[in-house]
Amino acid sequence: MVNLANYKDLVVGDRVIVPGNSEDFHTGDWRSAVPVIDSTVCIDCLTCWVYCPDDCILVKDGKVVGIKTTHCKGCGICAKSCPKHAITMKEEIE
């Protein structure tokens, strides 16, 4: 099994075809914006969770509790899909 901490550790042209290994690749460091959730506006409808292509919306007991920033690529789909506009994209500062 390949155990890499970062997508940059991949060898170009190498074959990484191991089912279930996406947790091994922290792809969140290539984004330029990060989603921020306003919990006072969020109604926990989980629409953002449904639409997030990278499964980065953290949910506990049916409530949104955060963002998995190690994998979030900053695409903004969660913010666009939120019916209450509780998620905004903020420029990420290093």
Image: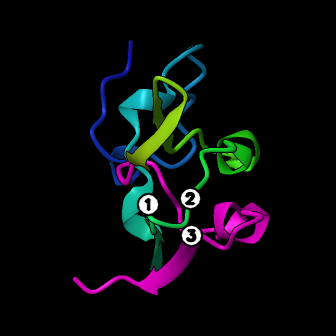
Q: Is residue 70 magenta?
A: yes
Q: Is residue 47 left or right of residue 42?
A: right
Whole-percent x, y for residue 59 in the image: 48, 33
Q: Give the label on residue 42, or none.
A: 2
Residue appearing at x 66%, y 73% in the figure: 85
Q: Is residue 41 left or right of residue 78?
A: left
Q: Is residue 44 left or right of residue 84?
A: left
* Tag in front: 3 or 2: 2
* Mark 1, other Cα within 10 Å: few <14 / some 14–19 / many ≥20: some
Regarding mark 1 in the picture, which secondary structure is present there?
Answer: loop
Three-letter residue code for mark 3: Ile
Mark 1 and mark 2: Cα distance apart in space: 5 Å
| Residue of label 3 | 87
> Would you say residue 76 is visible in this rendering?
yes
Number of numbered tags placed on the structure image: 3
Evaluate if marks 3 and 2 touch, with contact meaning CB atoms under 8 Å apart: yes
Disc nearer the start of the sequence (3/1): 1
Q: Give the label on residue 39, or none.
A: 1
Q: Is residue 93 magenta?
A: yes
| Magenta region, main secondary structure | loop
